[in-house]
Amino acid sequence: MSEQAPARPANRRKVALDPRLAAYKGVWVFVEHERGQAHSVSFELLGEGRKLADALGVELCGVVLGPPGQTTRGFCAQAFHYGADRCYLIEDPLLADYRNEPYTRGLTDLVNTFQPEILLLGASTLGRDLAGSVATTLKTGLTADCTELNIDPENRSLAATRPTFGGSLLCTIQTLNYRPQMATVRPRVMTMPDADTTRSGDIVEHPLGLIEADIITKVLEFIPDENRDQAQLAYADIIVSGGRGLKRPENFQLVWDLAKVLGAEVGASRPLVQAGWVGADRQVGQTGKTVRPKLYIAAGISGAIQHRVGMEASDVIIAINEDPAAPIFDFATYGIVGNAMQILPALTEAFRQHLATARRAG
Protein backbone atom coordinates (compact mmCIF):
# COMPACT_ATOMS: atom_id res chain seq x y z
CA MET A 1 0.00 0.00 0.00
CA SER A 2 1.09 3.55 -0.69
CA GLU A 3 -0.37 7.00 -1.00
CA GLN A 4 -1.48 6.13 -4.51
CA ALA A 5 -3.50 3.10 -5.58
CA PRO A 6 -0.93 0.33 -5.25
CA ALA A 7 0.75 -0.94 -8.40
CA ARG A 8 0.22 -4.60 -9.13
CA PRO A 9 3.51 -6.51 -9.20
CA ALA A 10 4.25 -8.26 -12.48
CA ASN A 11 4.91 -11.57 -10.71
CA ARG A 12 1.84 -11.65 -8.51
CA ARG A 13 0.14 -15.00 -8.07
CA LYS A 14 -2.86 -15.38 -10.36
CA VAL A 15 -6.04 -16.61 -8.72
CA ALA A 16 -8.20 -19.10 -10.58
CA LEU A 17 -11.74 -17.75 -10.53
CA ASP A 18 -14.68 -20.02 -9.81
CA PRO A 19 -16.22 -20.85 -13.24
CA ARG A 20 -19.70 -20.47 -11.74
CA LEU A 21 -19.09 -16.72 -11.54
CA ALA A 22 -19.42 -16.48 -15.33
CA ALA A 23 -23.19 -16.58 -14.88
CA TYR A 24 -23.09 -13.16 -13.18
CA LYS A 25 -23.37 -10.30 -15.68
CA GLY A 26 -24.07 -6.60 -15.48
CA VAL A 27 -23.45 -3.57 -13.30
CA TRP A 28 -26.27 -2.50 -10.96
CA VAL A 29 -26.79 0.78 -9.12
CA PHE A 30 -29.31 1.00 -6.29
CA VAL A 31 -31.38 4.18 -6.76
CA GLU A 32 -31.89 5.61 -3.29
CA HIS A 33 -34.85 7.87 -2.62
CA GLU A 34 -36.77 9.31 0.28
CA ARG A 35 -39.96 11.34 0.54
CA GLY A 36 -40.34 11.43 -3.24
CA GLN A 37 -36.79 12.63 -4.02
CA ALA A 38 -33.95 10.54 -5.46
CA HIS A 39 -30.58 10.98 -3.77
CA SER A 40 -28.00 12.61 -6.04
CA VAL A 41 -25.40 9.98 -5.13
CA SER A 42 -27.43 7.47 -7.16
CA PHE A 43 -26.94 9.51 -10.33
CA GLU A 44 -23.24 9.99 -9.57
CA LEU A 45 -22.93 6.21 -9.26
CA LEU A 46 -24.81 5.66 -12.51
CA GLY A 47 -22.22 7.83 -14.24
CA GLU A 48 -19.42 5.76 -12.72
CA GLY A 49 -21.31 2.53 -13.35
CA ARG A 50 -21.60 3.44 -17.02
CA LYS A 51 -17.80 3.44 -17.28
CA LEU A 52 -17.53 0.07 -15.54
CA ALA A 53 -20.26 -1.49 -17.68
CA ASP A 54 -18.64 -0.21 -20.88
CA ALA A 55 -15.26 -1.60 -19.79
CA LEU A 56 -16.87 -5.01 -19.22
CA GLY A 57 -19.13 -4.87 -22.27
CA VAL A 58 -22.28 -5.44 -20.18
CA GLU A 59 -25.51 -3.63 -19.31
CA LEU A 60 -25.83 -0.91 -16.69
CA CYS A 61 -29.00 -1.35 -14.66
CA GLY A 62 -30.78 0.74 -12.07
CA VAL A 63 -32.59 -0.88 -9.14
CA VAL A 64 -35.66 0.85 -7.70
CA LEU A 65 -37.71 -0.27 -4.70
CA GLY A 66 -40.69 1.75 -3.51
CA PRO A 67 -44.46 2.03 -3.15
CA PRO A 68 -46.71 1.68 -6.23
CA GLY A 69 -47.16 4.86 -8.22
CA GLN A 70 -45.78 7.22 -10.82
CA THR A 71 -43.21 8.66 -8.41
CA THR A 72 -41.50 5.30 -7.99
CA ARG A 73 -41.61 4.59 -11.71
CA GLY A 74 -40.25 8.07 -12.29
CA PHE A 75 -37.03 7.01 -10.56
CA CYS A 76 -36.60 4.38 -13.28
CA ALA A 77 -36.96 7.10 -15.91
CA GLN A 78 -34.30 9.15 -14.12
CA ALA A 79 -31.99 6.11 -14.03
CA PHE A 80 -32.30 5.86 -17.83
CA HIS A 81 -31.52 9.56 -18.19
CA TYR A 82 -28.29 9.07 -16.28
CA GLY A 83 -27.08 6.07 -18.24
CA ALA A 84 -28.98 2.92 -17.25
CA ASP A 85 -30.00 0.47 -20.01
CA ARG A 86 -32.47 -1.43 -17.85
CA CYS A 87 -34.22 -0.92 -14.53
CA TYR A 88 -35.30 -3.57 -12.06
CA LEU A 89 -38.39 -2.46 -10.18
CA ILE A 90 -40.16 -3.75 -7.06
CA GLU A 91 -43.34 -1.86 -6.19
CA ASP A 92 -45.10 -2.70 -2.94
CA PRO A 93 -46.93 -0.68 -0.25
CA LEU A 94 -44.52 -2.17 2.31
CA LEU A 95 -41.72 -0.18 0.69
CA ALA A 96 -43.32 3.23 1.29
CA ASP A 97 -40.79 3.99 4.03
CA TYR A 98 -37.31 2.55 4.30
CA ARG A 99 -37.08 -0.43 6.60
CA ASN A 100 -34.07 -2.71 6.50
CA GLU A 101 -35.94 -6.01 6.40
CA PRO A 102 -38.18 -5.54 3.32
CA TYR A 103 -35.51 -3.62 1.37
CA THR A 104 -32.92 -6.29 2.12
CA ARG A 105 -35.35 -9.02 1.12
CA GLY A 106 -36.25 -7.26 -2.13
CA LEU A 107 -32.68 -6.45 -3.17
CA THR A 108 -31.23 -9.86 -2.29
CA ASP A 109 -34.06 -11.60 -4.13
CA LEU A 110 -33.36 -9.50 -7.23
CA VAL A 111 -29.64 -10.35 -7.04
CA ASN A 112 -30.28 -14.07 -6.61
CA THR A 113 -32.74 -14.07 -9.52
CA PHE A 114 -30.88 -11.93 -12.08
CA GLN A 115 -27.24 -12.31 -10.90
CA PRO A 116 -25.37 -9.01 -11.41
CA GLU A 117 -21.60 -9.06 -11.15
CA ILE A 118 -21.31 -5.60 -9.55
CA LEU A 119 -23.72 -3.83 -7.17
CA LEU A 120 -23.09 -0.20 -6.15
CA LEU A 121 -24.86 1.80 -3.43
CA GLY A 122 -24.39 5.27 -2.00
CA ALA A 123 -22.58 5.49 1.33
CA SER A 124 -25.44 7.48 2.85
CA THR A 125 -27.09 6.55 6.14
CA LEU A 126 -29.66 4.46 4.25
CA GLY A 127 -27.14 3.01 1.79
CA ARG A 128 -24.68 1.92 4.46
CA ASP A 129 -27.42 0.20 6.43
CA LEU A 130 -28.77 -1.60 3.37
CA ALA A 131 -25.41 -2.51 1.83
CA GLY A 132 -24.13 -4.18 4.97
CA SER A 133 -27.19 -6.34 5.45
CA VAL A 134 -27.40 -7.30 1.76
CA ALA A 135 -23.71 -8.27 1.62
CA THR A 136 -24.10 -10.32 4.80
CA THR A 137 -27.20 -12.08 3.49
CA LEU A 138 -25.57 -12.84 0.14
CA LYS A 139 -22.27 -13.82 1.84
CA THR A 140 -20.25 -11.65 -0.50
CA GLY A 141 -17.62 -8.92 -0.12
CA LEU A 142 -18.35 -5.22 0.42
CA THR A 143 -15.82 -2.41 0.06
CA ALA A 144 -17.09 0.70 1.84
CA ASP A 145 -16.47 4.41 1.24
CA CYS A 146 -14.59 3.96 -2.04
CA THR A 147 -12.86 6.88 -3.72
CA GLU A 148 -12.13 5.14 -7.04
CA LEU A 149 -13.65 2.24 -8.99
CA ASN A 150 -11.97 0.43 -11.89
CA ILE A 151 -12.02 -2.89 -13.71
CA ASP A 152 -8.94 -5.11 -13.42
CA PRO A 153 -8.16 -6.05 -17.05
CA GLU A 154 -6.58 -9.38 -16.03
CA ASN A 155 -9.59 -10.92 -14.34
CA ARG A 156 -12.48 -8.49 -15.06
CA SER A 157 -12.94 -7.97 -11.32
CA LEU A 158 -13.94 -4.72 -9.65
CA ALA A 159 -10.90 -2.91 -8.24
CA ALA A 160 -12.29 -0.72 -5.44
CA THR A 161 -9.93 1.82 -3.89
CA ARG A 162 -10.50 3.29 -0.44
CA PRO A 163 -8.49 4.97 2.32
CA THR A 164 -7.21 2.80 5.15
CA PHE A 165 -5.25 3.17 8.41
CA GLY A 166 -7.25 6.21 9.46
CA GLY A 167 -7.08 7.74 5.99
CA SER A 168 -3.27 7.81 5.84
CA LEU A 169 -3.01 5.29 2.97
CA LEU A 170 -5.01 4.07 0.00
CA CYS A 171 -5.63 0.40 -0.73
CA THR A 172 -7.32 -1.39 -3.62
CA ILE A 173 -9.59 -4.31 -2.75
CA GLN A 174 -10.96 -7.04 -5.02
CA THR A 175 -13.64 -9.64 -4.35
CA LEU A 176 -12.42 -12.47 -6.56
CA ASN A 177 -14.51 -15.56 -5.82
CA TYR A 178 -17.85 -14.15 -4.68
CA ARG A 179 -20.59 -12.29 -6.51
CA PRO A 180 -21.89 -9.71 -6.68
CA GLN A 181 -18.91 -7.48 -5.98
CA MET A 182 -20.33 -4.73 -3.79
CA ALA A 183 -19.08 -1.23 -3.05
CA THR A 184 -20.41 1.97 -1.51
CA VAL A 185 -19.35 5.49 -2.49
CA ARG A 186 -20.06 8.67 -0.57
CA PRO A 187 -21.97 11.57 -2.12
CA ARG A 188 -19.92 14.03 -4.19
CA VAL A 189 -16.95 11.67 -4.61
CA MET A 190 -17.84 10.84 -8.22
CA THR A 191 -18.68 13.38 -10.92
CA MET A 192 -22.35 13.99 -11.65
CA PRO A 193 -22.99 12.98 -15.29
CA ASP A 194 -25.09 15.03 -17.66
CA ALA A 195 -28.67 13.84 -17.96
CA ASP A 196 -29.89 12.72 -21.38
CA THR A 197 -33.68 12.96 -21.25
CA THR A 198 -34.00 11.20 -24.63
CA ARG A 199 -32.76 7.92 -23.17
CA SER A 200 -35.17 5.17 -22.15
CA GLY A 201 -34.92 1.48 -21.37
CA ASP A 202 -36.66 -1.69 -20.26
CA ILE A 203 -38.32 -2.00 -16.86
CA VAL A 204 -38.26 -5.48 -15.30
CA GLU A 205 -40.86 -5.82 -12.54
CA HIS A 206 -40.41 -8.24 -9.65
CA PRO A 207 -42.60 -9.08 -6.62
CA LEU A 208 -41.51 -8.41 -3.04
CA GLY A 209 -43.14 -11.52 -1.60
CA LEU A 210 -43.71 -10.19 1.93
CA ILE A 211 -46.69 -9.21 4.03
CA GLU A 212 -46.72 -6.71 6.88
CA ALA A 213 -46.87 -9.50 9.47
CA ASP A 214 -43.48 -10.73 8.22
CA ILE A 215 -41.77 -7.44 9.15
CA ILE A 216 -40.70 -6.83 12.73
CA THR A 217 -40.06 -3.08 12.52
CA LYS A 218 -42.93 -0.60 12.19
CA VAL A 219 -42.87 3.04 11.12
CA LEU A 220 -44.81 5.03 13.71
CA GLU A 221 -43.96 8.56 12.61
CA PHE A 222 -41.60 10.41 10.28
CA ILE A 223 -39.75 13.25 11.99
CA PRO A 224 -37.68 15.30 9.48
CA ASP A 225 -34.19 16.47 10.38
CA GLU A 226 -33.85 20.13 11.22
CA ASN A 227 -30.79 21.11 9.23
CA ARG A 228 -31.15 24.88 9.25
CA ASP A 229 -28.29 25.29 11.74
CA GLN A 230 -26.21 22.43 10.36
CA ALA A 231 -23.36 22.81 7.91
CA GLN A 232 -24.28 21.80 4.35
CA LEU A 233 -20.76 21.21 3.10
CA ALA A 234 -21.62 18.52 0.57
CA TYR A 235 -23.68 20.97 -1.50
CA ALA A 236 -21.70 24.21 -1.06
CA ASP A 237 -20.25 25.98 -4.11
CA ILE A 238 -17.54 27.70 -2.04
CA ILE A 239 -15.85 26.35 1.09
CA VAL A 240 -13.20 28.00 3.26
CA SER A 241 -11.46 25.47 5.51
CA GLY A 242 -8.92 25.86 8.28
CA GLY A 243 -6.32 23.50 9.69
CA ARG A 244 -3.92 23.31 12.59
CA GLY A 245 -1.59 25.74 10.80
CA LEU A 246 -3.89 28.42 12.26
CA LYS A 247 -2.19 27.60 15.59
CA ARG A 248 -4.80 28.98 18.03
CA PRO A 249 -8.62 28.65 18.26
CA GLU A 250 -9.15 32.41 18.09
CA ASN A 251 -7.42 32.50 14.69
CA PHE A 252 -10.17 30.33 13.22
CA GLN A 253 -12.35 33.47 13.23
CA LEU A 254 -10.33 34.54 10.17
CA VAL A 255 -11.83 31.59 8.28
CA TRP A 256 -15.35 32.63 9.30
CA ASP A 257 -14.67 36.22 8.23
CA LEU A 258 -13.57 35.23 4.72
CA ALA A 259 -16.44 32.75 4.36
CA LYS A 260 -18.96 35.44 5.30
CA VAL A 261 -17.69 37.81 2.62
CA LEU A 262 -17.73 35.06 -0.03
CA GLY A 263 -21.07 33.58 1.04
CA ALA A 264 -19.22 30.32 1.63
CA GLU A 265 -19.52 27.37 3.98
CA VAL A 266 -16.87 26.83 6.64
CA GLY A 267 -14.94 23.57 6.87
CA ALA A 268 -12.10 22.23 8.96
CA SER A 269 -9.54 19.45 9.11
CA ARG A 270 -9.85 16.55 11.54
CA PRO A 271 -7.35 17.85 14.15
CA LEU A 272 -9.41 21.03 14.63
CA VAL A 273 -12.61 19.06 15.11
CA GLN A 274 -10.86 16.76 17.59
CA ALA A 275 -9.56 19.81 19.43
CA GLY A 276 -13.10 21.19 19.69
CA TRP A 277 -12.56 24.31 17.58
CA VAL A 278 -15.61 23.48 15.41
CA GLY A 279 -18.33 20.85 15.33
CA ALA A 280 -17.99 17.50 13.59
CA ASP A 281 -20.51 18.55 10.94
CA ARG A 282 -17.80 20.83 9.48
CA GLN A 283 -15.07 18.22 9.14
CA VAL A 284 -13.84 17.61 5.59
CA GLY A 285 -12.09 14.34 4.85
CA GLN A 286 -12.40 10.58 4.90
CA THR A 287 -13.92 10.54 8.38
CA GLY A 288 -15.91 13.71 7.71
CA LYS A 289 -17.66 15.12 4.66
CA THR A 290 -16.72 14.62 1.02
CA VAL A 291 -17.12 17.86 -0.93
CA ARG A 292 -16.94 19.00 -4.55
CA PRO A 293 -17.29 22.81 -4.53
CA LYS A 294 -16.41 25.18 -7.34
CA LEU A 295 -13.84 26.81 -5.02
CA TYR A 296 -12.07 25.32 -1.99
CA ILE A 297 -9.76 27.52 0.08
CA ALA A 298 -7.54 25.57 2.48
CA ALA A 299 -5.79 27.69 5.11
CA GLY A 300 -3.16 26.03 7.26
CA ILE A 301 -4.02 22.51 6.04
CA SER A 302 -1.11 20.23 5.18
CA GLY A 303 -3.04 18.06 2.71
CA ALA A 304 -2.64 14.60 4.23
CA ILE A 305 -4.49 11.77 2.50
CA GLN A 306 -7.24 11.77 5.14
CA HIS A 307 -8.20 15.33 4.18
CA ARG A 308 -7.29 15.08 0.51
CA VAL A 309 -9.79 12.35 -0.34
CA GLY A 310 -12.58 14.54 0.98
CA MET A 311 -11.88 17.61 -1.18
CA GLU A 312 -9.49 16.90 -4.06
CA ALA A 313 -12.37 16.76 -6.57
CA SER A 314 -13.05 20.49 -6.05
CA ASP A 315 -12.98 22.51 -9.29
CA VAL A 316 -10.42 25.02 -7.95
CA ILE A 317 -8.28 24.56 -4.83
CA ILE A 318 -6.39 27.48 -3.28
CA ALA A 319 -3.89 26.37 -0.64
CA ILE A 320 -2.32 28.65 1.97
CA ASN A 321 0.53 27.16 3.98
CA GLU A 322 3.83 28.30 5.45
CA ASP A 323 5.55 25.06 4.48
CA PRO A 324 6.46 25.05 0.76
CA ALA A 325 6.81 21.27 0.93
CA ALA A 326 3.29 20.70 2.28
CA PRO A 327 1.56 17.85 0.37
CA ILE A 328 -1.42 20.06 -0.45
CA PHE A 329 0.69 22.01 -2.96
CA ASP A 330 1.06 18.80 -4.99
CA PHE A 331 -2.60 18.90 -6.06
CA ALA A 332 -3.78 22.46 -5.38
CA THR A 333 -4.74 24.63 -8.36
CA TYR A 334 -3.05 27.66 -6.80
CA GLY A 335 -0.65 27.75 -3.86
CA ILE A 336 0.26 30.63 -1.56
CA VAL A 337 3.30 30.06 0.63
CA GLY A 338 2.90 32.29 3.66
CA ASN A 339 1.32 32.93 7.04
CA ALA A 340 -2.41 32.22 6.91
CA MET A 341 -3.04 34.68 9.74
CA GLN A 342 -1.75 37.46 7.47
CA ILE A 343 -3.09 36.20 4.14
CA LEU A 344 -6.68 35.46 5.23
CA PRO A 345 -7.41 39.04 6.39
CA ALA A 346 -5.83 40.39 3.20
CA LEU A 347 -8.04 38.14 1.06
CA THR A 348 -11.11 39.07 3.09
CA GLU A 349 -10.50 42.78 2.59
CA ALA A 350 -9.70 42.36 -1.12
CA PHE A 351 -12.89 40.40 -1.76
CA ARG A 352 -14.93 42.86 0.31
CA GLN A 353 -13.69 45.79 -1.75
CA HIS A 354 -14.17 43.95 -5.02
CA LEU A 355 -17.74 42.99 -4.18
CA ALA A 356 -18.53 46.52 -3.01
CA THR A 357 -17.18 47.92 -6.29
CA ALA A 358 -19.19 45.40 -8.29
CA ARG A 359 -22.39 46.30 -6.43
CA ARG A 360 -21.86 50.01 -7.11
CA ALA A 361 -21.16 49.34 -10.78
CA GLY A 362 -24.20 47.12 -11.08
Image (cartoon, rainbow, N blue to C red):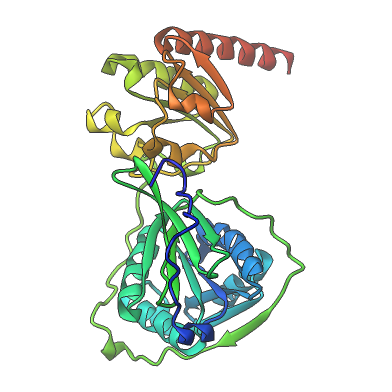
Q: Residue at x 25, y 77 (%)?
A: 217
Q: Residue 134: image x %, image y %?
A: 35, 75
Q: Residue at x 48, y 41 (%)?
A: 291
> In terms of image quadrants, where is residue 180?
bottom left
Q: Is residue 213 visible?
A: yes
Foreground of the two, 42 or 256 = 42
Foreground of the two, 69 or 247 = 247
Foreground of the two, 23 or 31 = 23
174 w.r.t. 277: above or below: below
> In terms of image quadrants, where is residue 153?
bottom right
Which quarter of the image is occupied by the C terminus? top right
Q: Residue at x 56, y 80 (%)?
A: 25
141 w.r.t. 166: above or below: below
> In terms of image quadrants, where is residue 103?
bottom left
303 w.r.t. 159: above or below: above
Q: Is residue 122 visible?
A: no
Q: Residue 177: image x %, image y %?
A: 40, 76
Q: Residue 360: image x %, image y %?
A: 69, 12
Q: Residue at x 53, y 41 (%)?
A: 292
Q: Residue 98: image x %, image y %?
A: 37, 71
Query: Which residue is outermost to the front?
Result: 11
